[in-house]
Amino acid sequence: MSSPSVPDATGRLSVREKIGYGLGDTASNFIFHTVNVFLFFYYVDVLGMGAAAIGTLFLVARMLDTVTDPLMGTLADRTNTRWGKYRPYLLWLAVPFGICGFLLFAVPDSDPSGQLVYAYVTYISVMLIYTAINIPYSALLGVITPNSAERTSVATYRFACAFGGQLLIVAAARPLVAYFGQDDDAAGYKITMGIFAAISVVLFIMTFKLTQERVQPPADQKSDLAKELKLLLRNVPWIVMFIAGIFTLANVAVRGAVTLFYFKYYAGDDGSPWLGNFDMSTVFLTSGTIALITGVMCTKWLTPLGDKRQLMIALSSLNALVMALFYFVPADALGLMFFLNVLGALLAGPTIPLVWSMFGDVADYGEWKFGHRSTGLVFSGVQFAQKFGLAIGSAMAGWLLASFGYVADAEQSPEAVKGIRLMFSILPALFATGGVVAIWFYPIRGADVERMGRELAAKKE
């Protein structure tokens, strides 16, 4: 493949490079989204592992990120190669990431304690490799172009590609598991994950080939981790995004963890006259992902209506309301479930490229305010917050399922069903509302972004 083209004087990138960058999140999601949607169900319902024990596993593994995320961010900021600071990690770690993702769904047939130990080792390994490859990938967004509006465009492509991958995953995963596993779901998950892992490796290498780094730190900038951490804690926009990230991903994790349980034990997952032979959870997840992609692609038409903060508050508030309404939907109201799901996904879609573009603005703010740019550290800190939110949501799902009396692959008590419904609706809505409250305090407005861009450009010149 040829190297990416040089952008014009405004910092605009070719569509080819934007798609190339987006394929990196497709690669991530072939493992990470599969983990978020199917791993909890695989451990608890397919293998029969204890829900509370798995909840604790998710929390313990993610607590390691308190150390690994900032370390990886600072390491990436200090990396200097002919390929740049962040791109090399996509090449170096693509294959290890794929191997670890495959092993995650290859739990051996042994005693419960042996399976739990295996789950700890492989899950922690996946999280470590994910940190090492995804923090540089995310930081690449902050240096691919100096143009803030163009970063929003790149982020839109990124998440269109990310959710395109998610669409393939949710549409194909369960049919592939059934096809390859026949009557053995565990074997089906193993083969399916092997296919997904191989695709992930290829896509990460393509991203490396098709992208380029263009924004450099100040020429006289010295490496000083203690100073960078202090400056990061003085960066108010970063603190706001850190807190918002925890709430947002806790919402995603708890809802994602119980989606298959919601359909298996409340709404029914045996299909319907108008769904044919497809199970409802697959169609539900697929239609929601299509709506999410549509929402992402609508971002460019929404951005003229307000600055990023205003749009985030409005869209996230409406999405929280839609999630809460699910608690009041009867088990047989399939049409209403699908309508609310599509509506919520359409509302959530634009928030994702907006928030990642805001991270790039936060990195600009740090350089503009303090004269020191730490793009990798900024993105690693926010990414840690998101993974911590995922840990909280996933752990709560396991603990709450156990406390409501869930029994693996059996008819559930009314209390257990009610608990699943609460975790699918009210609890994620509360987390989403917490994210809205945090974003309310985000201090960077549209005029500030333009001012920072002008002054940073003038300083570099």
Image (cartoon, rainbow, N blue to C red):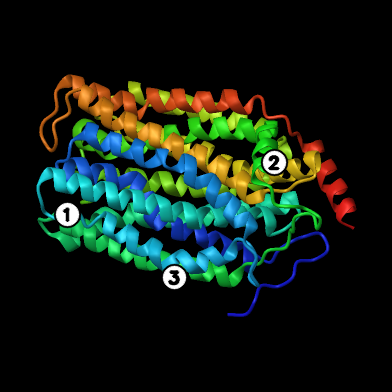
Q: Residue at x 69, y 31 (%)?
A: 236
Q: In which quarter of the image is residue 48?
A: top left
**Residue 207 or 239: which is nearer the viewer?**
239
Above or below for 396 versus 91: above
Apparent side of residue 250 relative to residue 334 in the rendered image (left or right): right
Q: How many numbered discs sit on the rendered protein? A: 3
Residue type (three-letter) at the residue carrying disc 3? Val
Q: Name the residue under label 2.
A: 227
Residue type (three-letter) at the residue carrying disc 2? Lys
Apparent side of residue 356 relative to residue 12 in the rendered image (left or right): left
Above or below for 362 versus 431: below
Q: Mark 1 points at which residue?
A: 186
Q: Name the residue under label 3.
A: 202
Badge 3 element: helix
Residue type (three-letter) at the residue carrying disc 1? Ala
For residue 329, say whether it is visible. no
Above or below for 193 versus 131: below
Badge 2 element: helix
Residue 329: x, y in percent?
32, 25
Q: Quadrant of residue 444?
A: top right
For residue 266, say whether it is visible. yes
Cα separation between marks 2 and 3 = 38 Å
Residue 44: x, y in percent?
20, 40
| Badge nearest the viewer, 2 or 1 | 2
Where the C terminus falls, by quadrant? Answer: bottom right
| Badge nearest the viewer, 2 or 3 | 2
Q: Which residue is drawn at 40% across and 68% down?
A: 95
